[in-house]
Image (cartoon, grey):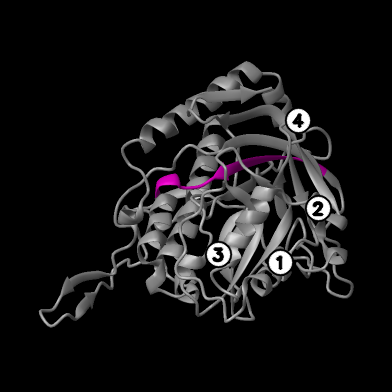
Amino acid sequence: MPRYKERGEINTGGMDAAELDVDIHERINRAFELYPLSRDELDTCRALLKPSRHTSIMVMPTHRINEVGEFQGFRFNAGSQINADILPISRKMFFGITMTECLSSQREDTRGVNSKAIDLLNNLDACKQKMQNILQNIQKASLHEKASFQCMPVNAYGMHEEGDAYLSDYRRYTDSKFWNPEPPEFIGIYHGFTRGFINDIREHKLYIACSGGLNYASHDFYNMILDMGDQVTTAKLCESEEVHWLRKASQRARCKIIKMVADEFGLDIPIELDTHEFSTNGCYIATPTTETIYHDIQKTSSDVISVYNHACNTELSDNGILCPMHPSEGIWLVQSKIIMGFPNLLVTYGAVGEGSEGLSRCPIQQGIGAFVGLKHHCKIDSECAWKTVF
């Protein structure tokens, strides 16, 4: 049976068991499922919806029970004024995939085959050793300096005897402790041919993609909901400092790893100063070209709180959606056609579809760009042993 935290007292609204069962069934949106829900999946949906009538679930095409017995692949909607303990918070909140496009030298003609990609393909053994060294260094560094809520910025440095807090006015947005990124779910270098939005020429590009997040900080967030979820509303949780910090820190962790890979392999990438770093000088991290978060919590314009589990909001993506495929296929970049009369010339890959409810506007029907992997795709198994898939 899928494991989720226990819910509070159930409010049936005066309905009997039969009416409640019909009401719950109507709040399960199965329009996009590719195959029927299993008994365990259906029981989990009912258990999530039963505590409150102000909730609903949209089942994703990729729904399944994962290897640890948890239901994944859905979007959970809840009213903004109900208790937050009703939300199905994952232990991998704000995990996602970040991709950075490598910069090409001005002297290099990328209309043919990228010479750097040829160099990497001709030295796969050396690439394998470099990637393993990076992952091992990340593993060692994260053992003693993990990211947690203790690393969050401290915005108060003193308390008056009457209870008033003195707010700090110096670098209030920086972390209070130094932390290192944790080993990613996967990290890889990819290549593919793309068309520019100005000269319409196919160019051979290199990309670095990293998937993962902050395990220990996500566990802190999960435990926080267990401890005080019945004392705060879903809206306050969505707008809390903990949510903002963990979402940003997870992105920074992926960008730090991408920067490590670029430095080790001698690849030029766009970088930026991480001003949130716990240091006087900060550090440089990769600038993400596009990013997709698969475990998120968001507030919609209709004052509804949405929790995404192995899903993403297509309406808020700025530069396409990254979909990791089989290692032999690399990563798919899902994008949409340019809206007639409003060409979006500010992005390279194109924004996604305008809607998330109708299948006719689903961005996967508008166009797919594929990144073919360099056949060097490092992953971590359940025992944290390093693997290289060829």
**Which label's residue is closer to the chain start, 1 or 3?**
1
Which residue matches tag 1?
A: 25
Report how many numbered discs are placed on residues in the image: 4
Pinpoint residue 189: horizontal percent, then vertical percent.
65, 35
Residue 320, visible in the rendered structure: no
Mark-to-mark CA distance, 1 and 3 = 24 Å
**Which label's residue is closer to the chain start, 2 or 4?**
2
| Residue type beneath disc 1 | His
Q: Are marks 2 and 3 in contact (CB under 8 Å)?
A: no
Task: Say which of 6 and 298 sits in front.
Answer: 6
Taking the image as shown, residue 245 lies to the left or right of residue 87, namely left
| 206 falls in the magenta region | yes
What residue sits 31% from the left and 37% below the top? 144
**Which label's residue is closer to the chain start, 1 or 4?**
1
Which residue matches tag 4?
A: 328
Mark-to-mark CA distance, 1 and 4 = 39 Å
Numbered range of the magenta stretch: 203-216
Q: Secondary structure at mark 4?
A: loop
What residue sits 77% from the left and 69% below the top? 357
Q: Nearer the viewer, mark 2 or mark 3?
A: 3
Which residue matches tag 3?
A: 297
Q: Does 112 appear above or below 244?
A: above
Mark-to-mark CA distance, 2 and 4 = 25 Å
Q: Main secondary structure of the magenta part?
A: strand
Task: Say which of 21 and 340 sits in front.
Answer: 21
Which residue matches tag 2?
A: 196
Q: Are marks 1 and 3 in contact (CB under 8 Å)?
A: no
| 301 falls in the magenta region | no
Q: Secondary structure at mark 2?
A: loop
